[in-house]
Amino acid sequence: MSVTIRGLLSTTALLVAGTAHAQPSPPEAENGGPIVVTAARSILPANALPLTVDVIVKDTLDEQLAIGGSVVDAVSNLTPSFSPTRQKLSGAGETLRGRSPLYAINGIPQSTPLRDGARDGFTIDGFFIDRVELIYGSNALQGIGGTGGIVNQVTVGAPKEEGLSGRALLQGTTDNNFHSDGIGWKTGGLFQYKAGDFDATIGGTYEKRGVFYDGQDRRVGLNLTQGETQDSQTTNFFARLGYATSATGRIDLIASRFELKGDGDFVAVPGNRTTGLPTSAERGDPPGKPAANRTESAALSYTDSGLWGGNFVSQIFFNRSRDTFGGEIAPIASFQDPAIAPVNTLFDQSQNRSRKLGAKFSYERAMPGFEALTATLGFDALWDKTEQRLIATNRTWVPPTEFRSLAPFAQANLKLFDGLVRVAGGARWENVQIKIDDFHTLASTTFVACPAGQPATTPCGPSTYGGVAVTGGKPKFDDVLLNGGVVVEPWEGIRAYASYAEGFTAPDVGRITRSIREPNADIDTFLAIEPIVSNNREIGVEVKRGPLDASATYFWSSSDKGQLLVPGIGRNFDVQRQRIEIEGLEVNLRTATPIEDLKLSVGYAHISGRFDSDADDIVDTDLDGVNISPDRVNLSAIYNRGPISAIVQTQFFLSRTFHADQNKTQPDQRNNFGGYSLTDASVRYQTGLGGVRLSVQNLFDKFYIDYSSDTRLPNDNLAFFAGRGRTFTLSWDYSF
């Protein structure tokens, strides 16, 4: 196989197994260069590594951004084993292979697993992304968080030509009936300058989104608490400074500030699940501050691809985020405190505050005198501090929680029989400590949330929240995470592989600590704090010959103390630690046709997962829609010829019924999923003054209830959301 991606390398580490799925290749790949996936932290080509990986290149990413509006939408549209997006600011319940993926920017983790605000998919504008690398399945390639895989967003590279260059974007979006409040627009600019060994890149974007309309021309409902991308404004400032210290060495400083803020012009209108009427929105003034997300990051790296005959990569980084959750019209039950205000009158809202400091180092080279063996040594360190505060009354909901990870690792890749067989394996020693000081949970009350959509004019019942003292502690986790795989390539372009890898993440400590109800609980002995260790095993085959690009992968994964989201008070979800087993099949096919420059593709994913509901170490109940994606079939036709590029794509989300074994508590059948299909289209024409693109999301203006709403909270009429109807986006882009 001969494929390539150009880009800077992050660092080196653990490898698993797999295939490169059928995404369009960058020019280097089409010209016969090797693919290098920076998220894999190795300069070996992808066909030398046992990795299941997709690469979404710039042209494809821009095409999907024009259709869906975000990197998360782009990944979801192109990846059958990724959940359908909620079209909200929160990505809670959006999974890859049934587990949460790690979002990263140039290898820097964006997730905050200690109190997962689920905003990690919205931390940088796609305008500044050169490509997206997806690594499938549990792995520890980038450390904590990769239990479902890795979504690594690689930012724009340094300019190649001397002098000034850049690009610009102007874009307008409207719903099918051109409502004035549904119109949005976006502008962006990027300027690059290179003078000898020095280069600089600076850019900015601004986007104003209108409200969304569904296929029946009704406003799509708002999730005021978790946050929206509709009715919002987004700004992003990006900068990159670089200096070539030698022919092989380079220093880079990359910084970004991203902020998405709700406008607060609308309030939610309850729907009716019984009649099928979805939640909607009307003009109004929601209480408190609108939901928002702000992420600031900076990274300094030094790389040298010729240091002592090998490749050295180092990186230190800083990341800070503020996730503001909006308020609700009715007082939130768990925030009530009679010492502050009468029960059922106290308004409050929460904000996640997270700060990360980290460093990554690695060195990779072929062994002198034994060039068939490539070895890697490295070390990662991460310090994360996260808390969740109630910002109207300045109370602590989730206590400040510190996470420290120190992780040396080693990896080897051995080429046998002139490349016919490759064997890879390695280990990563994770040394983790979580520190929480003594704290007190929110006050207990005699109030509980009323059913969604019912005015909370009187108390509806007793609360289940604590008001208890909790003794802090420093629970530790120390484990060696292993990986290994073998790749067999009997003929060029035909591979078979098998692999095993382990990944880990911290549970959502914030959800756990804020819901402790036992008096005098001790964090050091509180079992639910233990990290989640999951494994991934897979076998597959790949064929890339002539016009055919195909792959099939079967995988199965398990975790003894997995993390399951279950409904809590109101619309909050709590965490249960239970054994989880997931298995699935992924099939991808892409081929040229007799029509010149027309290619057709099909992708299929089947995923099933079960958990142990009664602690007998036997899985007995299906994972629901909050925790696993539906089966899916993707079809697309792609045409590229001269100045014209076009795509038509359809996603079929297949129906699903959730089951439990006999004599077990049956899942709520109201959460079953009926299925739906969506079609999108986009066409771009390159003129002498830039490119003009027209994109249409939900081409046939289909009315549907999105997967997340259809499969959770069956009594909540304020969380019954329709998907977006037909939406037009007209854009102009210019490069110089």
Image (cartoon, grey):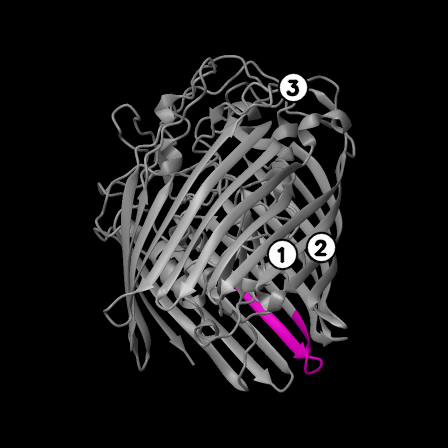
> Does the residue at mark 1 contact the one at mark 2 (Cβ under 8 Å)?
yes
Where residue 108 is drawn, which disc sits there?
A: 1
Q: Nearer the viewer, residue 313 or 729?
A: 313
- The image position of residue 3, as x and y in percent, is 49, 69
| Inter-mark Cα distance, 1 to 2 | 8 Å
Q: Amino acid at mark 3?
A: Arg
Q: Report, in whole angstroms, how far the alpha carbon at label 1 lies from the one at label 3.
A: 35 Å
Q: Between tags 3 and 2, which lies in front?
A: 2
What is the number of the mark on residue 358? 2
> Element at badge 2?
strand
Side (left or right) of 84 relative to 536: left
> Please, what secondary structure does the residue beneath circle 1 have?
strand
What residue is at 62 percent from the left and 54 percent from the top?
15
Query: Looking at the picture, how far across and down is residue 644, in whole percent?
Result: 27, 73
Q: Which residues are magenta?
A: 237-252
Disc assigned to residue 517: 3
Residue 255 location in percent, x, y?
61, 64
| Label 2 packing within 10 angstroms: few (<14), some (14-19), many (20+) | many
